[in-house]
Amino acid sequence: MVKPTATEHNLTPFADGHRAPLEEAAKQYLEDRSWMKLMGYGQERARALGITTEEDIDRLIAESRSEQRARIVLDNEALRSVRSSDCI
């Protein structure tokens, strides 16, 4: 992964025989860049969803959990209904 990325940026991946330090620096750069992309994505999603505070996050988590519990209850009721109709 280091060599193709270095080539994309017109860099020599292991100049002057200093493979280990350059490789480590390149790995760190790629990791940092990956985190920055992820944080950017998170910021875009938050903006699209109107999330501006930690309270918004807490509220959305509570809503999601409530909806999930409601689906489980409905699924269980549907299963009971099917099972009871099988007994007739």
Image: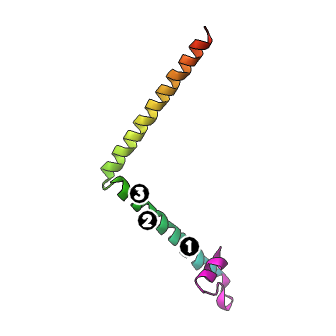
Q: Which residue is mark 1?
A: 30
> Measured from the top left, where is residue 46 in percent x and y?
38, 56
> Measured from the top left, where is residue 10 in percent x and y?
60, 86
Q: Nearer the viewer, mark 1 or mark 2?
A: 2
- Does residue 76 sit above or below 61 in this rendering? above
Q: CA distance from mark 1 to mark 2?
A: 15 Å
Q: Is residue 11 left or right of residue 75?
A: right
Q: Is residue 11 visible?
A: yes
Marks 3 and 2, the one that precedes in the sequence: 2
Marks 1 and 3, the one that precedes in the sequence: 1
Marks 1 and 2, the one that precedes in the sequence: 1
- Mark number, residue 40: 2
Question: Which residue is most to the right?
Answer: 17
- Does residue 36 sit above or below 18 in this rendering? above
- Does residue 33 sit above or below 42 in this rendering? below
Q: Nearer the viewer, mark 1 or mark 3?
A: 3
- Mark number, residue 15: none
